[in-house]
Amino acid sequence: MSNAKPSAGKPRRGWWSVSVRSGLAALLLGAAACVVVSVVCWLPDAGVSGRPASAIRAGLLAFLAGQGAGITLDGVYVLFVPLAISIAVALVAWRAGRTLAVAARDGGETEPRRLLGGLAAQVAAYAAGCGVLAHFARLGTTSVSSVTVIPAAIIMFGLFSGAAVLRFSPLREQLRLPALGDPVARAVLAVVVLLFAAGALLTTASVIVHAARVMDLSRQVGGGLSGLPVLVLGVLCAPNAAVAGSAYLTGPGFAVGSETTISPLGSSHGVLPAFPILGAVPDGSTANTLTTALGILTLLAAGAVAALVLVSAGVKAFVPVLKAVGSIAVSSGVVMAILAWRSGGSVGDDRLSAVGASPWRMAVYVALEVGASMLVSLGLYATGRWLISHHSQADATDERPARTLEKVG
């Protein structure tokens, strides 16, 4: 038996098999995780809440809804989905893409066409599996359409799996990506994480301030083990609330239906569903000083961190810096708009037809604010460097006469 390893130019025979298997493995992993959570929520009321098969179907429905295709819930079309489910899908897709990239490196796959073909096969296997699950995951009048879930799965899974393949496989070298790609990506990631963390901090503070209202709503919808499903749903919706908090800090604000809008410039309140996390929605008409200061500090910190990434990467020339600033600002706005889109949606066509932040407003606000903050930070950095350099030159000039006198003496 030969132990020779495949050469870099000779593709491995099982490449397509690896691609399809990794896509199906990602499908099973994501679906299994949602089913486990659903069964755990079903156990406390197992005697009155239906058969175990119902809990399994509910978990599959949650997983399929996390692809972004929406779900028909008791005859009402719902686009709003807990963002934690979509984040889990993204992580599964990233893991699958990295697995494919490692297989490509180990198997000597370097040809771009075959790498992209393997990625396409992986995405197709995952999306086809989602379409098959949609036929079985029906719970009464609640269902997910395979016609919408397949393209949604292709976009959702393909985006993150493709990013991982591009990051870890030889495809990155083959496409000869620009040198600024890495620092720009790191800066965008830093900005998005910082804005999300600030939104989460604001949401947590609001829950603490309105703890009495939140606890009262929790008791109304069910206490003890019977309220576990509501508690789990609230935890899964926590990232949605964090994105809403970041939208509040950056300026566009967010809506909870057609009658409730919350923004730094003012708020209007209508009747809200009795859902515990909605008890943390601010009830003031305008932003207070502390919240405004937190928003300004968050934006300044985001610009400073992004500028620090550029400086650390050695990007100093004027034109490349401007290009990088523009790329980071626009990309940050786009990513936050995607988060706003995925964390919002509609719950029917009535009062809750619009929930969450406006994606296009989020993109515009974040892009302009991050760009301006970066320019301020880079300007301060350049000014500081110039002052230090000028001071050093002045010191050197003052030392020259003294040295001359020493020589003469």
Image (spheres, grey):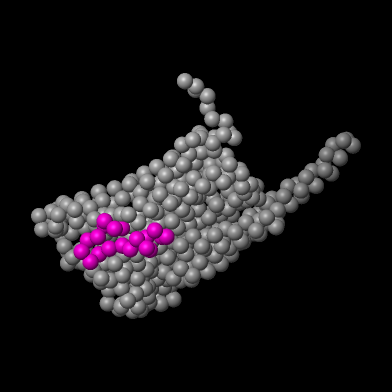
Instruction: Please tell me in which quadrant of the rendered image residue 270 appears.
Output: bottom left
Q: Residue furthest right?
A: 408
- Of residues 373 and 77, the one nearer the viewer is 77
- Of residues 267 and 125, the one nearer the viewer is 125
Q: Quadrant of the C terminus?
A: top right
Residue 294 in the image, given as x and y percentages of width and height = 44, 63
| Left or right: residue 45 compared with residue 139 | left
Residue 385 in the image, given as x and y percentages of width and height = 68, 52
Residue 29 in the image, given as x and y percentages of width and height = 33, 46
- Of residues 406 and 64, the one nearer the viewer is 64
Q: Residue furthest top?
A: 1
Magenta segment boundaries in residue numbering: 134-152
Residue appearing at x 16%, y 62% in the figure: 222
- Of residues 272 and 383, the one nearer the viewer is 272
Residue appearing at x 36%, y 73% in the figure: 354
Residue 347 in the image, given as x and y percentages of width and height = 31, 71
Residue appearing at x 59%, y 35% in the figure: 9
